[in-house]
Amino acid sequence: MDTSSTMDTSLESIVIIEGDILRRKESSGIPAVCVGDQVLIGRAHSGDENGMTTYFCGWVEINGVRAQVGEVEWSDYLPENRSDFTAPSSKVLVGRHHYGDENGPTKYAFASLLWRGEEVRMTPLRETIPQRESNSDSKGEAGEVMVGRKHTGDENGLTVYRYAVPMIPTPRC
């Protein structure tokens, strides 16, 4: 029997496909939300509150099938100068809203990730090394999506990003 055309469906792969790049003036108050089943995969910021923030969005593909983003929810507002947010279990970040300077409010958009109708769980998170906010630049490693962020102080304060890897759902019996 010729098996050259058969696929091994036991292979499990998670691929992040880079998508939209959103740029906002940090203090503008214009929300940055990934659309079209994209999730946050990174963020960069340069300068003070009048500097530009870049949000990197991307799609999650599991075993060749693109995952879908569920209903978007928003966190409560936190003061930016002491914000610390991690999406609830099995949720990913899809956006952020901030206005003003470091004393202004920040909130995060998060959602479930669905694959073939099943909610995707996340591996335990990984935190980045703290970096100065005024020159921060972070993207997830292979297969990672953003699930949280912590920041203290003004633009000279430190920012930590949190990432996790989606886990392939176990089929229901």
Image: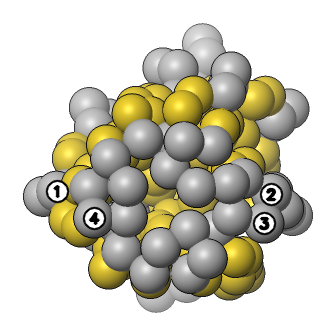
Can you tell which quarter of the image residue 124 is in? top left
Instruction: Tell me what residue is drawn at x 44 percent, y 81 percent.
Output: 47
Q: Disc 1 on helix, strand or loop?
A: loop
> Which numbered disc covers residue 130?
1
Q: Which mark is residue 29?
A: 2
Q: For the point 65% across and 38% down, which residue is it?
A: 105
Residue 73 position within the rendered picture, expressed as x and y whole percent measured from the top left: 78, 28
With 138 as the anchor, is 23 left or right in this view? right
Secondary structure at numbered mark 2: loop
| Tag 2 near tag 3, CB within 8 Å | yes
Q: Nearer the viewer, mark 2 or mark 1?
A: 2
Q: Does the residue at mark 2 contact the one at mark 4 (Cβ under 8 Å)?
A: no
Task: Name the amino acid, label 3.
Answer: Ser
Q: Nearer the viewer, residue 91 or 104?
A: 104
**Residue under label 3:** 28
Mark pair 1, 3: CA separation: 25 Å
Q: Amino acid at mark 1?
A: Pro
Q: Amino acid at mark 4?
A: Asn
With 130 as the anchor, is 110 left or right in this view?
A: right
Q: Earlier in the sequence, mark 4 or mark 1?
A: 1
Estimate how packed mark 2 is, as few (under 14), some (14 to 19) or many (20 or more) residues with alpha carbons within 10 Å: some
Rendering coords of residue 44 (x, y %)? 45, 76
Which residue lies most toward the top here?
173
CA distance separating discs 2 and 3: 4 Å
| Amino acid bearing label 2 | Gly
Which mark, by number, is residue 156?
4
Q: Is residue 163 left or right of residue 38?
A: left
Q: Are marks 4 and 1 in contact (CB under 8 Å)?
A: no
Q: Secondary structure at mark 3?
A: loop
Could you tell me residue 63's position as x and y percent? 54, 60
Please state if 168 lies on the left or on the right of 106 as rendered: left
